[in-house]
Amino acid sequence: MWRLILALTLGLSLTSSVGSAQQPGSSGRSRAMVPYKLGFENMRAEKWAEAAKSFQDAIEIDPEFDLAWYMLGRVRMNQRQFAQAVQAFTTTRDLSLAIAGRQFTNAQDRQRDRRDRIVQMDEILRSYRSGPQNMQTQDAIRQIEERKRQLQENINQGNDINVDTTVPAYVSLSLGSAHYRTGNRSEAEKYYKEAIATDPKAGEAHNNLAVVYLETGRATEAEREIEAAEKAGFKVHPQLKADIQAAKKKTG
């Protein structure tokens, strides 16, 4: 079935205002890394309730730990708790925007923040690589690797520019898919478009946007998104392509 493809392999509210929690690299973030890593171990064992608790523990220690919120959202997707996944991914997105505006007292703090974020992304990459490999997994790995590459490049060059000026495409994509699962097509469309604006090669976002377009009577737009997905190297389900052509004939 071609209906929306979700990277399932991988509801709380933010309890402190942005800017008041521990800076990455501080003792709070260091302590939060312990349950954060435990969460991945539980995910690999498909212990979803335990994984959720681990990521929640990390968030309780450091409410601004955006990647812990992101992983909690992934767990909620696996648990099919889609409304809670929306909440977790929304918080991830909000924190990503706040991080983009974060001010550092010196260049050393900024570079340490970048190194810490690379370590945290490495945990996510390991979780993707240890699970089933498919087009969705490969697309997510590519997006995260690109984010890592940007951070590492700025570390190597000693850049004082913050590369986190946009919400990561994989966050927008996940938020769109969570909204889709709740039945909210308009919000799903919004965040798939946001993912594509950040990363035009996000094949899964193009594919999923095509699904939304097809289900809302826009077969021509759906066909364009399928073409973009395939151009990005994403393998589109043949049935989806057939359904788009059938819809075009009906409206043509």
Image: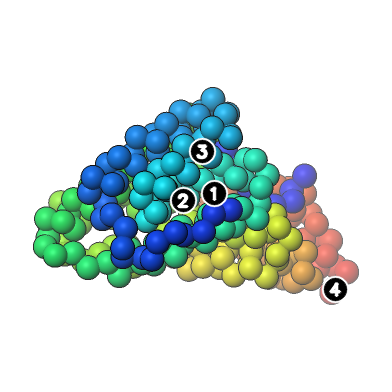
Alpha carbon of mark 2 to alpha carbon of mark 1: how far?
6 Å
Image point 28% across, 47% down: which residue? 28
Residue 53 image label: 3
Amino acid type, mark 4:
Thr
Q: Earlier in the sequence, mark 4 or mark 2?
A: 2
Q: Earlier in the sequence, mark 3 or mark 1?
A: 3
Horizontally, residue 36 falls left or right of residue 11, namely left
Q: Which residue is mark 4?
A: 251
Amino acid type, mark 2:
Trp
Circle 4 — which element?
helix
Q: Quadrant of the N terminus?
A: top right
Q: Quadrant of the C terminus?
A: bottom right
Q: Position of residue 9 (x, y in %)?
A: 57, 38
Q: Which residue is mark 2?
A: 69
Q: Which residue is mark 1?
A: 73
Marks 2/1 in contact by CB < 8 Å: the verdict is: yes
Amino acid type, mark 1:
Gly
Res. 22 in view:
yes
Alpha carbon of mark 4 to alpha carbon of mark 3: how far?
49 Å
For discs 1 and 4, the disc positioned in front in the rendered view: 1
